[in-house]
Amino acid sequence: MRQPSATIQRLQGSERAGQSAAPGPGVIPLQTGDPDFPTPPHIVEALGDAVEQGYTHYPPYQGDPELRAVIADQLSARSGVTWSAEDVSITNGGSGAIYGGMVAYLDPGDQVLVPQPNFSLYGDVAQSIGAEVSNVPLTTDLHLDLDALRAAAGPRARMVILCNPCNPTGTVFRRDELLELAAFCQERDLLMLADEAYERILFDGRVHISALELPDMADRLLFVQTFSKTYAMTGWRLGYLAARGGMAKSGMIVHRTAVGTVNWAVQRAGIVALTTPSDWPDRMVEEYAFRRGMLDELLRDAEGASWRPPEGTFYAFVKYRADMSAREMTRFLLERGVAVRSGTEFGPGGEGHVRLSFATSRDNIREGAHRLAAAFAESATR
């Protein structure tokens, strides 16, 4: 039997590679980041219209020109900086944008600074091309530690990752820490890959400060966005990489080499998603807020765990007290009928935590929270 490459062997070591989206019968699924809402009907209708209109062939390799222009106009309006359609490449979800941007601008041996816990794909991509991943712990309240970032940055530091709002912690980063992060990038001549997939999912009146708004960052920014979370379009695989100075085109060369272009009819539906006024996203966030409140009520006093309501996203990062690893706790909870993610899937700083998703039904959340509370209490006595 032939052995896979060293790259595959590195990736097989990632906890993310071993996670299952289907936990089995009778298990409450609180592990996946897939909204349980249907895609809004006007977007679904737009897809059918696009197919009927003949958008069934290869699209322009950088993406549909009209969609890219719409995105560029929105980026310009938000940032106060001029973005053009040439600065936007349409990708296979946000993951395609992350892959294209990182591979295009990292060489083997380059250092990537990843505040963590954080989405594991960033580290997986960096490792796949031989870059060095430096996991830099967040503060105890799960915010950016700029002193730690400065201390970690070596002579080959090339890129810093920002996921805001953050998966898995649910943190929404403050303006002051983002301004300090931008200043650090300028001091060290770093690129910033900013993944803002959850920008619309905010609670308690919090305001999302986009990396697009940070001063003097436009020419060192790899901006990643997806339609998946805001519009419940995870299966449509539609996202984009926005980057100036030819960087979006470079990212698209990587993307095209790996997976080609994105379904043209889906791109046409994306135009409708961005340009049609709709209360669907707000209604979804209202429901997420209700579900978050359910978890808060059921877990805030749970014995054996510490509950911190997330500021954004549809994830909660729960600290437990039992003397077992995050992987062991994940298996322990699965044996008691609830599926979650191991905290260490998101980096070493996730030890002692598990991630819950409330992108599922109220019934699942209610029953899952009861099972979690009982399991955490049981684990504390072991």
Image (tube, rainbow, N blue to C red):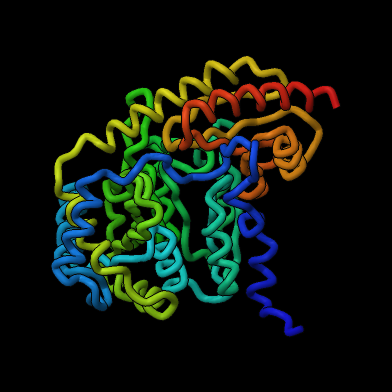
Image quarter (top left, top right, bottom left or bottom right) of the N terminus: bottom right
Q: Position of residue 160 (x, y in %)?
A: 47, 57
Judge from the rendering whether residue 220 lies leftward or rightward of residue 338; answer left or right. left
Judge from the rendering whether residue 34 lies leftward or rightward of residue 42; answer left or right. right
Residue at image point 35% right, 45% down: 232
Residue at image point 23% right, 73% down: 56
- In the figure, 320 relative to 133: above or below? above
Residue at image point 26% right, 78% down: 58
- In the figure, 152 relative to 253: above or below? above
Residue at image point 63% right, 74% down: 7
Q: Nearer the viewer, residue 300 or 84?
A: 300
- In the figure, 122 relative to 324: above or below? below
Judge from the rendering whether residue 3 lies leftward or rightward of residue 317; answer left or right. right
Q: Position of residue 206 (x, y in %)?
A: 34, 28
Identify the residue at the far right of this view: 382
Q: Nearer the viewer, residue 18 or 181?
A: 18
Image quarter (top left, top right, bottom left or bottom right) of the C terminus: top right
- In the figure, 321 relative to 50: above or below? above
Q: Position of residue 257 (x, y in %)?
A: 41, 80
Q: Position of residue 70 (x, y in %)?
A: 16, 57
